[in-house]
Amino acid sequence: MIIYIISDGKKGHLSQTRGLAAALLEEARSRKPDTEHAVHEIDVSGKSFFAKFFYKGKDLTLPEPDLCLCAGHGTHWAALSLARHKGCPCMVCMKPSVPLSWFDLCITPRHDLPEGTPVGSGIFPTNGAINGIRPQPQVAKTETLILIGGPSKSYNWDAETLIRQLDDIARHSTTPMVLTTSRRTPADFAGDVNATCPSIRVIPVSETGPNWVAEHLAAAREVWVTQDSVSMVYESLSSGAPVGILEMPAKEGPHKPDASRIARGLNMLIADGSVRRYTDWAKTRELPANAQPLNEAGRAAAYIIENFPSLLS
């Protein structure tokens, strides 16, 4: 199976398509080990709308694709055009900005779909955005990992409230704690944590590499994630670690959490016991055991291989 990833170069979108492509190759190799299987990334971020609309891949010197994958509104036209020209299926890892029926399959987070949307009719609902994180049972679980986001459409930033939660968690932790920030985290927060919670090792995002989070998720006994960072919540659940939610003050108005599709997804995780908010954790000092790690990439890959048998023909 030859897969083309049509990319806009954005890390979050690539995380989804790479995660699904890796799961598809794993599934394909298990079924046809003697056949060539590969993934090729095609960055269309620098192309004009006109060039994307009529994109035929004339600049490519690659094997012919069996499947085109994309994520990100800026990739839709190029992926659809290229797949049509190559005569292969085109699938998107999101709710697209064009009619869903234009794609052979839309692998879409449940929080982007009407409640109760079933699998089928060109839609495969997932629990959150697909990612490439897998449990690593062979890696020793030696630390508590803390992932900090920042101000968002739904939540205000309150450093004092976050540090108070971190201080309480640190006083009850029996494992070393490591914290990293994100591009949205205010610049002075790392210093505030160092001054107030000296037992927490702080690694600013500027000092981390592309695989830092994945490597530390593999070694995490438990993970704490700020309420705004929903994609990191799903990645943490995919690692198999118990997950706690650091609470942030909600905004009022049209962007308040109840009106946010992403926050609705987090509320679903809280309601079904997959994750636990800090205020609930403080009552028991326990996080919910993650007995069944999320594997949405693997689940989607198995569905695709079963329902699109031509991909392995």
Image (spheres, helix red, strand yellow):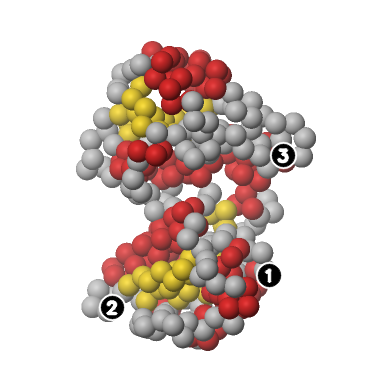
Measured along the vertical axis of the image, is residue 265 above or below residue 279? below
Q: Residue 210 bears which disc, if any?
A: none
Q: Is residue 275 visible?
A: no
Q: Is residue 143 visible?
A: yes
Mark pair 3, 1: CA separation? 25 Å
* Horizontal and vertical percent position of residue 94: 57, 59
Q: Earlier in the sequence, mark 3 or mark 1?
A: 1
Number of numbered labels in the structure image:
3
* Horizontal and vertical percent position of residue 40: 38, 71
Q: Residue 36 bears which disc, if any?
A: 2
What residue is rendered at 70% in x and 31% in y? 251
Specify whether 238 is left or right of 229: left
Mark 1: which amino acid?
Pro
Measured along the vertical axis of the image, is residue 272 above or below residue 55? above
Q: Earlier in the sequence, mark 2 or mark 1?
A: 2
Residue on which the image places disc 3: 255
Specify whether 178 is left or right of 11: left
* Horizontal and vertical percent position of residue 68: 48, 74
Residue on which the image places disc 1: 99
Query: Label 3 crowding class (10 Å Cα cut-off): few <14, some 14-19, many 20+?
Result: some
* Horizontal and vertical percent position of residue 25: 34, 67
Mark 3: which amino acid?
His
Q: Nearer the viewer, residue 179 or 124?
A: 179
Query: Label 2 crowding class (10 Å Cα cut-off): few <14, some 14-19, many 20+?
Result: few
| Mark 2 residue element | loop
Instruction: Pick the quarter of the image with the C terminus.
Output: bottom left
Measured along the vertical axis of the image, is residue 150 above or below residue 80? above
